Image (spheres, rainbow, N blue to C red):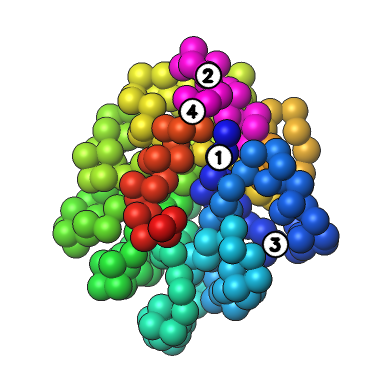
């Protein structure tokens, strides 16, 4: 029984210590692969290096919407060049985050659109980070005829928006939030939509499950995995099988 952590930041300093030993322990706990999204240009090399060192690590490069102020067109050029030189599994995490403010809406939308176009050009899926911007993200995906699909990480939208993502071929990432007792909206989405709509993630070292403390680790995916099985009244095996197949559907070139 194996599960994939589709979103963890193993390049983060909080998880840097004893990484090789820890990856072995996490694999014993049931993890098979770890997807590492980039958030800013300065962490791209570390992510690539880790993916060279560990066959279990899948590298993604991208500029997170909350870090665009540190970046300019030169970084998008660098991203384009790295995509030609390196084995990168996806573009991410990219998207829109208007949770605290819409001050940089135009700039966020520009960076997102440019990176989405890049993903389309090099035929890579995307991992999306979206908070309070689902309508805008869905519109940009449609307007740009983006067809490479991807994952909406730490899904936070409505059930109606979830269906629109599924229609575009996306999967929804479920993490620590699912385990919070007050996460009624997300839990009902997890119960109502087909099981193959979902993939699991930890976002380690962030977003620990309910009652767990920082730093979160990929090990804690077991808590999310159990919660989803409980909500669906199904076995852990079924969640593992269906979610692993869902990941393979989005990343068909990564596992063979
Ligand atoms: Zn993240």
Residue 88's spot in the image, x, y percent?
A: 45, 70
Depth order, front residue of 131/47? 47
Query: For the magenta stretch, what is the residue range?
Result: 221-238
Tell me the mark number nearer the camera, choosing from 3 and 2: 2
Residue ID for mark 2:
235
Residue identified by numbered label 4: 239
Q: Residues within 10 Å of mark 2 (few under 14, many from 20)?
A: few
Image position, residue 206 (x, y; %): 66, 47
Q: Which element carries disc 4, helix, strand or loop?
A: helix
Marks 2 and 4 sit apart, C-alpha to C-alpha, by 7 Å
Local secondary structure at mark 2: loop
Labels 4 & 3 near each other (Cβ < 8 A): no
- Of the numbered discs 2 and 1, the one sitting upstream in the chain is 1
What residue appears at the point 33 percent right and 25 percent down from the top-left corner?
194
In the image, what residue occupies the spot 22% across and 39% down? Answer: 167
Q: Are marks 2 and 1 in contact (CB under 8 Å)?
A: no
Q: Are marks 2 and 4 in contact (CB under 8 Å)?
A: yes
């Amino acid at each position: 029984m194996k599960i994939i952590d589709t979103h963890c930041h193993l390049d983060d300093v909080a998880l840097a210590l004893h990484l090789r030993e820890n990856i072995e322990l996490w694999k014993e706990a049931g993890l098979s692969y770890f997807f590492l999204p980039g958030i800013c240009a300065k962490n791209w090399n570390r992510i690539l290096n880790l993916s060279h060192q560990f066959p279990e690590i899948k590298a993604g490069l991208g500029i997170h919407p909350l870090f665009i102020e540190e970046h300019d067109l030169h970084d998008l050029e660098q991203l384009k060049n790295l995509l030609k030189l390196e084995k990168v599994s996806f573009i991410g995490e990219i998207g829109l985050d208007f949770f605290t403010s819409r001050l940089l809406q135009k700039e966020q939308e520009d960076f997102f659109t440019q990176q989405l176009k890049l993903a389309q050009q090099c035929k890579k899926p995307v991992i999306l980070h979206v908070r309070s911007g689902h309508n805008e993200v869905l519109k940009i995906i449609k307007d740009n005829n983006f067809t490479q699909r991807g994952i909406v990480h730490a899904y936070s939208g409505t059930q109606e928006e979830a269906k629109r993502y599924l229609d575009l071929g996306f999967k929804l990432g479920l993490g620590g939030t699912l385990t919070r007792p007050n996460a009624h909206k997300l839990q009902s989405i997890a119960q109502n939509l087909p099981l193959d709509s979902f993939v699991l993630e930890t976002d380690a070292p962030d977003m620990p499950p309910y009652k767990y403390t920082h730093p979160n680790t990929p090990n804690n995916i077991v808590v999310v995995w159990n919660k989803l099985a409980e909500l669906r009244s199904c076995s852990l095996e079924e969640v593992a099988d269906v979610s692993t197949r869902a990941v393979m559907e989005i990343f068909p070139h990564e596992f063979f």
